[in-house]
Amino acid sequence: MNTKKKMLLYNVIFLLFCGGLFLFLWRAPEETTARMPYDDTHQKFYTMQKKEADKQCSSCHNPEGVMPLPGQHPPKHRCLFCHKKVAR
Ligand code: HEC
Ligand code: HEC
């Protein structure tokens, strides 16, 4: 193979790799992350602006609260970005 073809091949492989990584990251949270329950505690957040709601989650979801986050929890600002609402 000449150099030009090799470069093209490397670029294609690189792009495929990036695409795969992107799809992986994009899909992973959507399918496994627990959704925010629709119960008495969380109901009010369904009608609230997401940014407003996010600020109030940690009043209960903190180490001393009713339901602490698991130890391995990812970075946690913007709760509702990952913990989607359940369909009603
Ligand atoms: C008044 C306290 C309180 C507030 C505020 C609160 N939660 Fe919760 N949350 C709970 C309790 C208690 C549970 C466990 C029982 C249940 O499912 O309601 C829980 C459970 C959860 C779960 C786990 C559900 C599961 O299937 O394991 C998620 C996700 C969650 N809350 C997200 C949120 C988000 C996002 C917010 C902010 C918009 C929030 N919570 C605000 C008390 C609260
Ligand atoms: C970057 C994505 C992300 C953000 C932002 C985020 N979480 Fe999580 N959370 C996760 C993942 C992933 C898990 C572990 C897998 C699961 O949901 O069971 C988890 C687990 C939890 C659990 C335990 C669920 C269970 O069933 O054991 C609660 C409660 C929770 N998160 C609440 C919150 C709250 C409250 C916030 C905002 C302060 C928040 N999360 C922000 C991704 C996120």
Image (spheres, rainbow, N blue to C red):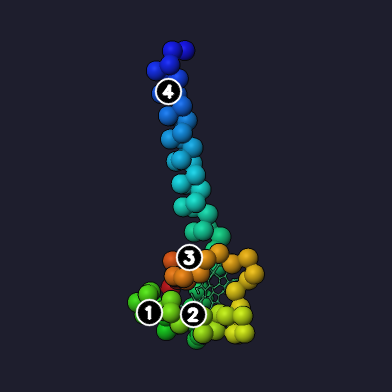
Earlier along the polypeptide chain: callout 3 or callout 4? 4
Disc 3 target residue: 82
Residue neighbourhood size for the residue with mark 3, other residues' Cα within 10 Å, grouped as few (<14), some (14–19), many (≥20): some
The type of residue carrying mark 4 is: Met
The type of residue carrying mark 3 is: Cys
Outermost residue toward the right in this view? 71
- Gap in Å between the C-alphas at discs 2 and 1? 10 Å
Earlier along the polypeptide chain: callout 2 or callout 1? 1
Element type where label 4 sits in the image: helix
The vertical placement of 31 against 43, above or below, is above
Residue neighbourhood size for the residue with mark 1, other residues' Cα within 10 Å, grouped as few (<14), some (14–19), many (≥20): few
Disc 1 target residue: 52
Element type where label 3 sits in the image: helix
Residue neighbourhood size for the residue with mark 2, other residues' Cα within 10 Å, grouped as few (<14), some (14–19), many (≥20): some
The type of residue carrying mark 2 is: Cys
Disc 4 target residue: 7
Q: Quadrant of ligand 1?
A: bottom right
Disc 2 target residue: 57
